Amino acid sequence: MFRSFRALLFFIVVLALPTLACGLGGGEEPTAAATIAPTEAPPQATDTAVPQPTATDVPPTPTDVPTVEPIGEPTPTQGLPGAPTKEALPTLDAGNGGTVSTIELASAPYTQPDGSFSLNPPAGWEITNDEGSASIEAPDGSGFIYVQITDTGIGLDAAGFTNFVEYRDLNFFTGFDNYVEVSQEIDTDTRVASVTKNLSFEGVPQTVITLYDQYDAIIYTYDFWSDDANVDAYSDLYSRLVDTIQVDTTAAAEQVEYNWVYTFTGPNNLFTIEVPTPWRYEQTEGENTLVDTFYSPDDHAVIQNITYDDGTETSRSQAGALALELLRSFYATDINIQSDEVQPDGSERLIWNSPSGDYSGTSFFETRGTTFLLFTTMYDNPFEAFYLETLNYTIETYEIPES
């Protein structure tokens, strides 16, 4: 697919963006028996026998889980990739006579090396690219454009697109100082959205306007940064640039699904994993439990860790019984264990499915002192081909931080 962005020319209005319109449609989804939604609180262990805790310093890596042929590795991102360096920036006049307002667009378009998009950048701005992304920076650092492409594997419906927008924006930007969301506009019919926020980058107040545009399983994201002193002038510049954008979704579909991830650190620094940036994060807490859950935008795949600690140590035999009890409490009463294997690091891996729920999962459990950990990835069976590679990657990134 190759299409121009002419319909999006007027999307930038400082601090208040209108709903956008351009012709997009969501793709059809397989019919799943049910989405995964573990909600019940886990039971408490009752046996207080002295345990035999296992040390673990190697991430669990499944060896017989069905795999999807990989086409690369996701790229971790921390904050803003390729962010501009801002040193003693001048305060530029944003009015008609200002320096910023005179910037023209380059006469020749920039084309991403894989052909996934092209645009006419501001003349004289530096461009760097990576797989699935490009950064465009003003010479003085007062403006910055970041283009990012995500392949979701399957076209998200209206609810899924909304989740993608909300949680990509939150997970990507909330780490910046003084972050405040100013406005969010989502057109679920056309699958176009815009989010405006204020934040500080290296002490400089910023306005960032992000445009989301979905083409079936491909979502283009454009972050337009400007120092607050120049926001009016850059608004005009970025509007002119948007009118030059063209995309090729066939080329974009060559990259890894959910390529963009961030590092999540578990409670009490017990573990770290890499999680897709636009997945929804929720944390729930019980008397002795803390549950960290990440949902795919369409709720057809889940990453979850249950941390259980009632102050008593749990033996290896008790751990196995507790793991099965938690699986049946959280996910389904008809859990069918297909494989049970002790891992080299001392943890134990369970591969299971639920016939009634029509979903499958891989769980790892272990004890560390009085703490019991149950780490699980799961998916609705009709969506296996779209999520298994992403979930396996998350498992492979499971690490125990050094003390």
Image: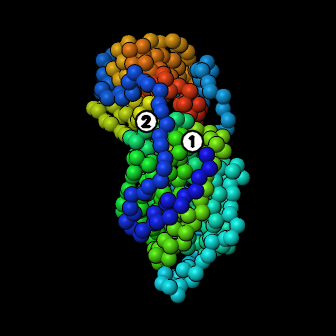
- In the displayed orientation, state which residue is furthest to the left: 287
Point out residue 31 in the picture as x, y percentages from the top left corner. 44, 25
Q: Could you tell whether 31 is left or right of 67 in the image?
A: left
Q: For the point 61% across and 56% down, which residue is it?
A: 246
Question: Which disc, if any, is residue 151?
Answer: 1
Work out how far the residue at label 2 is from the one at label 1, CA to CA, in angstroms.
14 Å
Q: Could you tell whether 128 is left or right of 218 in the image?
A: right
- Residue 112, by quadrant, is bottom right
Question: Which disc, if any, is residue 268?
Answer: none
The residue type indicated by label 1 comes to: Asp
Q: For the point 49% across and 71% down, which residue is it?
A: 235
Q: For the point 51% across and 17% down, which residue is it?
A: 351
Front residue of 254 and 83 = 254
Residue 326 visible to the viewer: no
- Residue 72, by quadrant, is top right
Point out residue 275 in the picture as x, y percentages from the top left corner. 51, 40
Point out residue 178 in the picture as x, y percentages from the top left corner. 40, 64
Q: Could you tell whether 188 is left or right of 402 in the image?
A: left
Task: Indicate whether 244 appears above or below 357.
Answer: below
Front residue of 193 and 277 = 193
Q: Could you tell whether 15 is left or right of 226 in the image?
A: left
**Mark 2 highlights which residue?**
298
Task: Indicate whether 334 appears above or below 168.
Answer: above
Secondary structure type for disc 1: strand
Task: Indicate whether 202 appears above or below 114.
Answer: below
Residue 100 visible to the viewer: yes
Q: For the point 56% across and 27% down, which residue is it?
A: 385
Task: Give the tally of numbered discs.
Answer: 2
The residue type indicated by label 2 comes to: Asp
Front residue of 348 and 57 = 348
Secondary structure type for disc 2: loop
- In the displayed orientation, state which residue is furthest to the bottom: 97
